[in-house]
């Protein structure tokens, strides 16, 4: 079931650095000093996607990684996208901030 824009924005308030852009939710992870670790981050995203059976668009660039979530079968954002974003945040917070 598609989520309303209000619900999406409310949910994004509880997530880390996700934005609602062009009817999709998007997160950009800046390269910063972790350039050599970007491949590892992509692998973590891929592993989470396989586990959830929900596959984001992943764009790896020199400046970082852009993750875009959108449920293609529903042509919009569903709870599956929000749940997957939450799962990614949990996985990535320890990788991006190991002191946590």
Image (cartoon, rainbow, N blue to C red):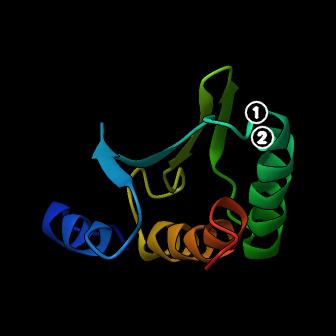
In the image, residue 61 sits, relative to residue 15, either above or below, namely above
In the image, residue 98 sits, relative to residue 17, either above or below, namely below
The residue identified by callout 2 is 38
26 or 89, which is in the foreground? 89
Secondary element at image label 2: helix
Q: Is residue 14 left or right of residue 66?
A: left
Residue 34: image x %, image y %? 73, 41
Secondary element at image label 1: helix
Residue 53: image x %, image y %? 75, 68
Q: Which mark is in front, 2 or 1?
A: 1
What residue is drawn where x is 26% and y is 66%? 8
Residue 49: image x %, image y %? 74, 63
Q: CA distance from mark 2 to mark 1?
A: 6 Å
Q: Is residue 14 left or right of residue 61?
A: left
What residue is drawn where x is 81% and y is 74%? 51
Q: Which quarter of the figure has residue 31?
A: top right
The residue identified by callout 1 is 35
What residue is drawn where x is 56% and y is 69%? 89
Q: Which mark is residue 57?
A: none
Q: Are marks 2 and 1 in contact (CB under 8 Å)?
A: yes
In the image, residue 94 sits, relative to residue 28, either above or below, namely below
Q: Which quarter of the figure has residue 79?
A: bottom left
79 or 31, which is in the foreground? 31
Q: Is residue 44 left or right of residue 62?
A: right
Q: Is residue 85 left or right of residue 44?
A: left
| View extreme (top): residue | 62
The quadrant in which the C terminus is found is bottom right
What residue is drawn where x is 77% and y is 51%? 41
61 or 67, which is in the foreground? 61
């Amino acid at each position: 079931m598609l989520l309303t824009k209000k619900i999406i924005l409310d949910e994004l308030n509880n997530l880390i650095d996700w934005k609602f852009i062009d009817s999709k939710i998007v997160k950009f992870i800046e390269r910063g000093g972790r350039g050599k670790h970007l491949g590892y981050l992509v692998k973590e995203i891929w592993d989470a996607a396989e586990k959830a059976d929900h596959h984001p668009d992943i764009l790896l660039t020199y400046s970082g990684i852009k993750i875009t979530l959108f449920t293609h079968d529903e042509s919009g954002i569903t709870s599956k996208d929000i749940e997957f974003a939450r799962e990614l945040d949990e996985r990535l917070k320890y990788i991006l901030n190991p002191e946590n």
